[in-house]
Image (cartoon, grey):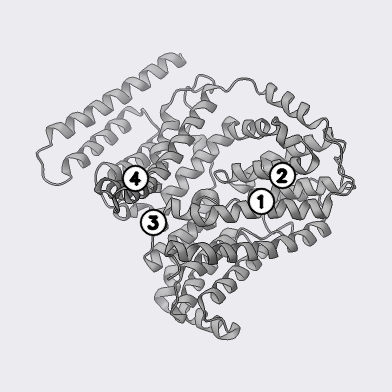
Amino acid sequence: MEDQGGSMTRLKLAVSLAASAASWWLLRGLPGNQAPVAAVFVLTVTLWVSEALPLTATALLSTALLVFVGGIDEKKAFAAYGDTIVPLFVGSFILAKAMEITGLSNRFSWLILTQKWATRSPSSLLLAMGFIGCAISLFVSNTATTAMLLPIGVSMLSALGAGTDEIPFATAMMLMLTWGSSVAVGLPVGTPPNLIGIGMIQETAGVTITFMQWVAFAMPITLAMILAAWVVLWVLYRRNAPSIAHARPLALERYRELGRMGPAERNVLITFLIVLALWMIPDLSSAATELAQGKAAPWTKWLQGHLTPAVAALLGVALLFILPARDTGHGRTITWKQAASIDWGVIMLFGGGIALGQAMFSSGLAKTFGQTAADLTGAHSLWAITALCIAAAIILSELGSNTAAATTLVPVAIAIANGAGVSPIPPALGVALGASFGFILPVSTAPNAIVYSSGLVPAKQMMRSGALIDVVGFVVTLGCLYLILPAMGLAK
C-alpha cells in the first residue's frame, strides 16, 4: 500500500509539474513575468487539488517560487506573512524538527563520541560534548539540543562512574551542554535573536545582513566562546576528573544500536545539505566573480535577489514532503502534523516584536529612550554604545528569554546609535548576540533549566561559573565586532 501511495504521489507531482511547464510555454509571449507567475499559479492549484503535498506546505512553496522563478520582490511576496524573516523562521524550524524526529541529530552526537580524539582524555571529552551541542544548535533550537544531549551526557557520566553532583566533572559536563548549545550564534538561523536582529536592522536601518556576512563576524564569536567555555569549566572543575576508559566503548555500542541510516534520516540529511548550499551559493558566487572579474556578474545579482535565505529554506524544506521514506509508516519523510509542532510561539513573538519596534520608532519613544540612556551612561561613541548594548542584552537575558531581550533592546540600540549619529549596526548586532549569553540562573534559559533538573549542577556553581562566562561573552562579542565589522564595511 505504501508503494502504491508513493507511486500515486509521484504521479501527481509529475502531472502538476507538467501542467505548470506547459502553461509557461503556452503563455511565453505575455509581457514581463506573467508567464512564470502563471506557471506558479497552475502548479499551486494542481498541487492543492491533487493533495500531492500538504496544503500548507504547498502554500509556502508557492510563495517561495513566486520570488525564485516569478521575479516577484521578496518583500511583496512575503508581505502576507508579516515579514520576510517569518518564512525563514518557519523553514529552518521545520528542518530542525525533522532532524529531531528522525534521530539524525542523535546519530551525529554518538558518531562524534566514537572518534578517538573525543575520548582521549577527560578534557577532550568535555570539549567534544560542547562541540556537539554547538554544532547541532547551529540548526536546531538550543532547548531541543540540550534536551537531546542530556541523556547522552548522563549515560556517559554513569559509564565513567561520575554520575553524581559530588564529582566536579559531572557539573562541568552538564554546564558544557547548555553553554555549547547557547553560544551557537555562528549562523543566522542558530537562534531567534539572530533573526530578530537581522530583521530589525533591515526594517529600521535599511541594511541587509547576508548569510555569509553573518557567518564572517558571528562564527568567530561562536568558536571563541566554545573554547572559552571549555577552558573555564576545565579550570574550575577538573579536580578528581574520572578515568574515561569506558567512554569510547559506550559510544561505539550506542552508535551500533542505531543501525544503518534509514530513508527518512537520509532524506533529512540530503535536505539539510541542499538548504545549506542554497544559503551559501548567492554570497559565494558573488564573491567569486568579484575576485575574478573585479565586479559581481549579473547572474549573481539575480541569485541574491531571487534565492534569498527564506526562499532557500522553503524550497529545501519542500523536499521533506516530497522524498519518499518507507520507514515512517506514512511514506513521507515527515507529515505536516509533525512539521506543525514547531515553536509557533517564537514566531508570534517575533511578529509582535516587529510591530512593537515599529511603533516605538514611529511614536518617537525609541529615540527618547535612546537619548536618555546615552545621557545617563555617557555613551556617545560607536563602541561605547555597542558595549552598553551588549551588557544590557546579557543582563536582560538573565531575567527573561533571549528572544524577549532581543525584541525589547534592538530598537533601543538602534535609537541610541541614531541619536549619537553613529552606525546602528554594531549596537543592534551586539544586542542580538549578547542576548544569547545569559548563563547565571537556572531560569535564565531553558537549557540552563534542563541541565539544572539533572541534579548534577548545584545552583551556586551555576551562578559562579555563569557570571564568569557572562563576562567572557561580553569581552568576546565586543572584541570580535570591533575587529571584524569595520573591515566588512558594517561599522561606518
154 lies left or right of 321? right
Tag 2 residue: 127
Q: At numbered mark 1, what does the secondary structure look like: helix, strand or loop?
A: helix
Tell which circle, 1 or 4, labels the residue nearer the N-terminal end: 1
What is the spatial separation of the Cα atoms under label 4 and label 2, in whole angstroms? Answer: 36 Å
Disc on res. 422: none
Mark 3 vs 2: CB contact within 8 A: no
What is the spatial separation of the Cα atoms under label 1 and label 2, in whole angstroms? Answer: 8 Å
Q: Nearer the viewer, mark 1 or mark 3?
A: 1
* Residue 315 point in image, percent of width and height: 38, 38
Disc on res. 307: 4
Assess disc 3: are there few (<14), some (14-19) or many (≥20) residues with their C-alpha within 10 Å of its C-alpha: few
Tell which circle, 4 or 3, labels the residue nearer the N-terminal end: 3
Tag 3 residue: 82
What is the spatial separation of the Cα atoms under label 1 and label 4, in whole angstroms? Answer: 32 Å
What is the spatial separation of the Cα atoms under label 1 and label 3, in whole angstroms? Answer: 35 Å
Mark 1 vs 2: CB contact within 8 A: yes
Q: Is residue 301 above or below residue 246?
A: below
Mark 4 vs 2: CB contact within 8 A: no
Disc on res. 226: 1
Q: Amino acid at mark 4?
A: Leu
Q: Is residue 268 above or below residue 262?
A: below
Mark 4 vs 3: CB contact within 8 A: no
